[in-house]
Image (cartoon, coloured by chain):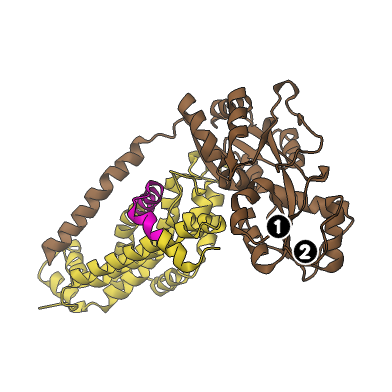
Amino acid sequence: MKPLLTAALLSLTLLSTPLLLAKETTPAAPKVIKMATTTSTENSGLLQDILPKFETKTGYSVQVIAVGSGKALKMGEDGDVDVVLSHAPAAEKEFVAKGFGDQRYPVMYNDFIVLGPEADPAALKGSTTAPEAFGKIASKAALFISRGDDSGTHKKELKLWETAKLKPAGDWYREAGDGMEKVIQMAGELSAYTLADRGTWLSVADKSPLKVLHEGDKDLFNPYGIMAVSQTRYPDINHAGAQALIDWLVSAEGQQAIGEFKVNGSVLFTPNADTSTANTDAKTAAPATAQ
Amino acid sequence: MASLLDATAEALSLLFNGDAALWEIVAISFEVSAIALLIATPPALLLAFVLAYGQFPGRRLTISLFSTLLSVPTVVIGLTLYLLLSRQGPLGEFRLLFTQTAIVLGQIVLAFPMLVSIGHSALQAADRRAWETARTLGASPFRALLTVTYEVRFGLLAAVLASFGRIISEVGASMMLGGNILHHTRNIPTAIALETSKGEFAQGIALGMVLLVLAFTLNILLHHFQGKGYIGS
């Protein structure tokens, strides 16, 4: 019995030695860029598609932490990541104004859409604006699933209720506190309405019973911005790497990579970086909806 | 949504066609949990021994304390460590958040009370005379400790296996501390959470099956070590 036990312990130790050594020899290299971002950019497959191009070219390695925009910005504020890519323009501008980030670069946009069950119990179809559509959902007290997680989409949704001069509350309004895909699944299972970004929707549409019931008005414009976390505030972060990533994303090459990324034949994100007008959104007009 | 059967069939093909992404996630899970366990086990079992054989004030309280720690939700441990490791926290200067080391730390904290509690029960159940005999025969305390440890090796092995099961299947702390970074801190539980949220149930099921097979193998091994299932000849 004893030799067996010894053998087991020995093999376990041997197995893990290279692992331990590997840990030791991997330095916290400046070649690693930590990026906090929203779930839509990671889960739609965009980043996995375009980042390898950047990594091969520059030798940097990008580690993506996908959370809601609110949390991503918070991680940037705390200095726990080097760069933040999010879609919450108001919060992003505040982030820069407070000195947590140097500058906001517009990268791309897509648009939000209102999803709901095919039967459309609140008769949303034909609404001209998103707040109007939201008004119909509220007046019918039709089931609505909110992200409820302080993400960019959640912030957008709250803004739309505000524009509609409504305070959503009651049994029909449910806060999931979860990511976009999960909320689309929930809405599908419960035949509920929800607000989604088009990128995520296109990547899960074939698995969902929901339909796009309202889209295309300017209230639903969804711009993405990227900000390097302030080096002044956190001198030891990988600021050079963050800036290299930003430079590549807004370069002709990065912008082309974004524009060429497709899911099921549809373009998910429209590149809109314009270095001459950095810090403002190059296009603030109504988005072209991907049809 | 695909039916359970379809998803399972797809999962099996993912597994057996050696889907590299899937196996990478499995490897990360194993690495991290094995390292955590290797670090946590020796001090935890030593403490368990001291609690079983020592006489000092606060002994019972300490035992209760470790049993209580077993009930703390993993997300609470994740949150506590997050606040400690975030650069706004006291250990921020080490920049450990969103690294494998952070997950290892979380898993050590999770495994420790379990090793102590189960280890203590096993050691306490040992025949005290083994210790006394060894000591009267002139064994040093360390030598006597080894004797007792050998007597209850199956109980201690069970403590280690149970702890391994706890930490490798844990999602809350891994997600918060590791950040679910592809190729880096994405492990089996966080990958299942992600794939499920994306509606990719096959991947989730495949990873779940790996965990099951793993648990099964470990238990077979345990039984093998136990021989006939009892101590003594």
Tag 1–tag 2 contact (CB < 8 Å): yes
Other residues around mark 2 within 10 Å, as few (<14) / some (14–19) / many (≥20): some
Residue B18 is inside the magenta segment: yes
Where is residue B25? Give x, y as percent: 40, 50
Image quarter for residue B162? bottom left
Say which mark, if any, is on residue A211: 1
Query: In the figure, A240 relative to B5: above or below?
Result: above
In the image, residue B199 sits, relative to residue B20, either above or below, namely below
- Along the line of sight, the residue nearer the viewer: B223 or B35: B223
Q: Residue at x 48, y 68 (%)?
A: B4
Along the line of sight, the residue nearer the viewer: A117 or A150: A117
Going from N to C along the chain, the mark reached first, 1 or 2, is 2
Q: Magenta stretch containing residue A148, yes or no?
A: no
* Residue type at tag 1: Lys
> Tag 2, which secondary structure?
loop
- The chain coloured yellow is B
Instruction: For residue A272, say whether it is visible.
Output: yes
Q: Colour of chain A?
A: brown
Q: Is residue A59 visible?
A: no
Find the magenta span and give its range. Answer: B11-32
**As drawn, B68 above or below A34:** below
Categorize mark 1 by other alpha carbons within 10 Å: few (<14), some (14-19), many (20+): some
Q: Main secondary structure of the magenta part?
A: helix
Q: Quadrant of the C terminus of chain A?
A: top right
Q: Secondary structure at mark 1?
A: strand
Q: Which mark is residue A120?
A: 2
